């Protein structure tokens, strides 16, 4: 299992921002420094590489 550093900030993103918001709530209670990307990928207006 891969472990991530708790004090390092982590940005969470999903399609709309709702699932990543729930994940942020869960992980922040566990002591992680996490930030939800509001609006998710639906709010992104930049280029997307495929």
Image (cartoon, rainbow, N blue to C red):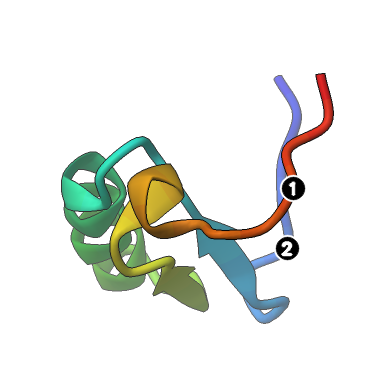
Q: Is residue 28 left or right of residue 44?
A: left
Identify which residue is drawn at 38% across, 58% down: 43
The residue under label 2 is 5
In front: 48, or 21?
A: 48
- Res 47 label: 1
- Looking at the image, is mark 1 or mark 2 earlier in the sequence? 2
Question: Element under label 1?
Answer: loop
- The picture quadrant where one finds residue 25 is bottom left
Question: In the rendering, which numbered label is found on residue 22?
Answer: none
User: Which quadrant would residue 50 be assigned to in this image?
Assistant: top right
| Quarter that holds the N terminus | top right
Rounded to the nearest angstrom, the CA distance separating label 1 from label 2 is 29 Å
Count of residue discs: 2
Image location (x, y in percent) of residue 3: 72, 41
Position of residue 33 measured from the top left corner of the image (x, y, whole percent): 52, 78
In the depicted view, which residue is nearer to us: 22 or 26? 22
Q: Residues within 10 Å of mark 2 (few under 14, many from 20)?
A: few
**Does residue 7 sit above or below 11 in this rendering?**
below
User: What residue appears at the point 16 percent right and 48 percent down from the top-left corner?
Assistant: 18
Asked if the residues shown at circle 1 and circle 2 are in contact, with their CB atoms under 8 angstroms apart, the answer is: no
Which sits in the foreground, 48 or 5? 48
Local crowd at mark 1 within 10 Å, few (<14), some, or many (≥20)? few
41 relative to 28 in the view: left or right: right
Q: Nearer the viewer, mark 1 or mark 2?
A: 1
* Label 2: which secondary element: loop
Residue at 35% x, 46% y is: 42
Residue 12 location (% of width, % of height): 48, 55
């Amino acid at each position: 299992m891969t472990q991530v550093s708790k004090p390092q900030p982590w940005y969470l993103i999903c399609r709309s921002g709702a699932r990543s918001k729930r994940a942020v709530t869960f992980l922040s209670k566990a002591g992680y420094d996490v930030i939800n990307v509001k609006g998710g990928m639906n709010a992104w207006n930049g280029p997307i590489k495929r």
